[in-house]
Image (cartoon, grey):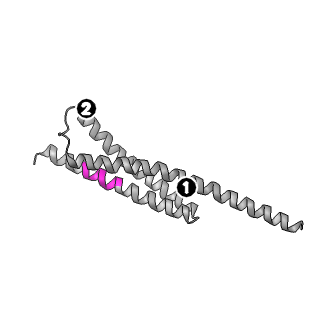
Amino acid sequence: MSDTKKADTQRLMQLIVKSSKVTSLAMQSMKSALAGDLSSARELLDEAKAKGVEAHNIQTEMIQLEIKGEASSPTLLAVHAQDHFMNSHLLLEMVGIVVEQQKQMKALQERVIKLEQVGETHE
């Protein structure tokens, strides 16, 4: 295997690993949010976003190499890596929405409880 091919394979494997970590952290974030632990959810989401930036940087490097004509031809591994990256990126966006919705729902629930308490004191 040529040095270029080895380097490409290493970059692709790193893209898969980092994207998989993004997916894992995003899922943990969503589960925390749904369980009501918004602090943990936000922390996990921030960590997932940081890993997402790392994955994006790898992808950007690979695109730049391709533009320069220094990349090898597409492979199944490259398609697989891109699939992981795209899915993790989409999931990250969706989980951000879920966390924000859970935050809003918690605020509304707290408001309802306060209103119910006020109503009980007037009865």
- Per the model, the C-alpha gap separating discs 1 and 2 is 38 Å
Taking depth in this image into account, of 58 and 78 the one nearest to the observer is: 78
- To which residue does mark 2 refer? 67
Please report the residue visible at 33 percent of the width from the left and 51 percent of the height from the top. Answer: 84
What element does badge 1 sit on? helix
Q: Is residue 96 visible?
A: yes
> Which of disc 2 and disc 1 is earlier in sequence?
2
Q: How dense is the environment of label 2, judged by Cα within 10 Å: few (below 14), some, or many (20 and up)?
A: few
Q: Residue furthest top?
A: 68
In which quadrant will I find the C terminus? bottom right
Q: Amino acid at mark 1?
A: Val
Taking depth in this image into account, of 108 and 29 the one nearest to the observer is: 108
What element does badge 2 sit on? helix
Please report the residue visible at 28 percent of the width from the left and 37 percent of the height from the top. Answer: 63
* 73 is higher (above) or lower (below) than 112: above
Image coordinates for residue 13, horizontal then vertical, percent = 25, 53
How many marks the image carries: the answer is 2
Q: Is residue 49 visible?
A: no
Camera-side mark, 1 or 2: 1
* Main secondary structure of the magenta stretch: helix
Taking depth in this image into account, of 73 and 48 the one nearest to the observer is: 73
Question: Is residue 16 located in the magenta-colored stretch of the structure?
Answer: yes
The span picked out in magenta is 12-19
Q: Amino acid at mark 2?
A: Ile
Image coordinates for residue 38, horizontal then vertical, percent = 57, 60
Q: Residue furthest front?
A: 123
- To which residue does mark 1 refer? 99
